[in-house]
Image (tube, helix red, strand yellow):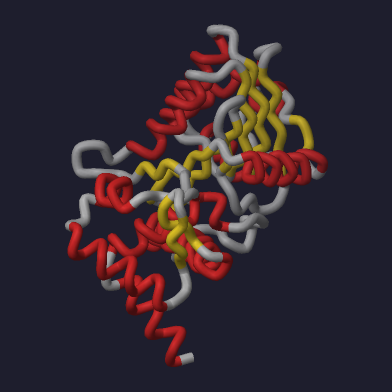
Amino acid sequence: MERVLDDIEFLARSANRVDVLRLVADRPHTRVELAEATDASQPTLGRILHDFEGRRWIAHESAGYSATATGRLVAEGLTELSRCLETEHKLRELLEWLPVEQLDFDLRRLQTARVTVPTQTRPGAPVGRVIECIEAADSVTVLSHAFNDRTLEAVADWVDAGGTFEGVFSVTAITSVTDDDALAHQLNQLAESQRASLSLYDGPVPLAVTLTEDVVSLLVRDEAGRLQAALDTDDPVVREWAETVYSEFHQKSRPLEVEQLNTDQFEG
């Protein structure tokens, strides 16, 4: 184990070492090509190549330096570790609120996810990002435990302009909307549209997921219900997961009838 840790420390001390190993694992490189690709000085590059040859990670051939079988193994491991750490750094501040129990996919799939967080100048940035995705789509599918005023207004206008909307919401999400006369009116218009289909789920909905043709968006809230981030990705595995989760909730939901909204007191 000590030798393994020594090699990890050896690589971690220099970004040039990592870059050189990845380059020669991809294809043979001459010393000149390596210098141009890494901006390493010739003395530095010479030491790196000497150390790699001593570990039998590279070999010098007519075409240049190339990785050996074990060198490629180390390079692949470095790439995988880098991907894991990049994803971890992206999710670190959100981990305490991320519904990981429901995220039935490898979290490394979120490596390229776009993360939008609130700022002082844009406290509603996460919702704004989801609305951007909705407005750029032709059809939208939503599973959520909340339906806030900005999203409801955006969806109502978007459906009125020709979009197709399908959503499964918890009863509490709809109840909170019907408690506000203006929002209740917008919800009623949405429910009456031929291009919208709303369903009620009688239990808790632990996720807020939006699917468009291009992306899957996940809203992350803290324990007080405050939005902390929006994550959106075009990863196909995440999309398959989101479609499966939505289907499972949809199968156990019931249609929201317009007549229910037109009663004096909506109770689900």
Residue at far bottom of view: 2
Residue at far front of view: 62
Which of the two residues, 71 or 75, is positioned nearer the viewer here? 71
How far across and how far down the image is residue 167, in percent?
65, 31
How far across and how far down the image is residue 145, in percent?
57, 45
How far across and how far down the image is residue 90, in percent?
39, 55
Q: Does the image show residue 46?
A: yes
Q: Tell me the residue at 40%/32% (across/down).
A: 129
Q: Tell me the residue at 56%/50% (across/down).
A: 109
Image quadrant where one finds the C terminus: top right
Q: Is residue 197 above or below residue 27?
A: above
Q: Is residue 249 left or right of residue 191?
A: right
Q: Is residue 170 above or below residue 67?
A: above
How far across and how far down the image is residue 245, in percent?
71, 46
Q: Is residue 203 above or below residue 195?
A: below
Residue at far right of view: 251
Q: Tell me the residue at 48%/19% (across/down).
A: 135
Which of the two residues, 252 or 57, is positioned nearer the viewer here? 57
